[in-house]
Image: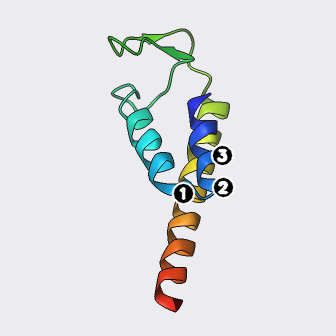
Amino acid sequence: MCLLLADALANVGELEEAERRFERLLSFSSPLGLFSEEVDPRTGVLLGNYPQAFSHLALVAAAVNIERERNHALGQRARG
């Protein structure tokens, strides 16, 4: 799952790449903010089922870790 990749990138300090991927993934949500199992990357057509619990849990985890890393990076710049 690509949200897990954004989360992992944030955890290893690759903040810009994590944010870029996270923002791109948000563009694939349905008009109701739901995420399907798959997306055709060329057309953006949502494919498959909508497994809400896991996709939204991954979305929240990625957002929290990106924000945590952003604040950590800001703190380091302020100190150094």
Residue to which mark 1 is pinned: 66
Question: Which kind of residue does numbered mark 2 sit on?
Answer: Asn
Pointers 1 and 2 in contact (C-beta within 8 Å): no
Q: Which residue is mark 3?
A: 8
Residue 1: give x, y in percent of width and height. 62, 27
The colour scheme of the drawn protein is rainbow
Kind of element beneath mark 3: helix
Q: Is residue 44 above or below residue 7?
A: above
Q: Position of residue 32 (x, y in %)?
A: 38, 30
Q: Amino acid at mark 1?
A: Ile
- Mark closer to the chain start, 1 or 2: 2
Name the one closer to the observer, 32 or 55. 55
Q: CA distance from mark 1 to mark 2?
A: 8 Å
- Give the mark, 3 or 1, whose residue is nearer the N terminus: 3
The residue shown at (64%, 41%) is: 57
Image spot of residue 6 (x, y percent) = 56, 42
Q: Circle 2 is placed at which residue position? A: 11
Residue type, label 3: Ala
Within 10 Å of the Cα at label 3, are there few (<14), some (14-19), or many (20+) other Cα atoms?
some
Answer yes or no: do the residues labelled 3 and 2 have beta carbons within 8 Å? yes
* Image quadrant in which you'd find residue 2: top right
Q: Residue at (47%, 47%) from the top-left corner? A: 17
Q: Residue at x 66, y 55 (%)?
A: 11
Residue 3 drawn above or below residue 69: above
The alpha-carbon separation of the residues under discs 3 and 1 comes to: 9 Å
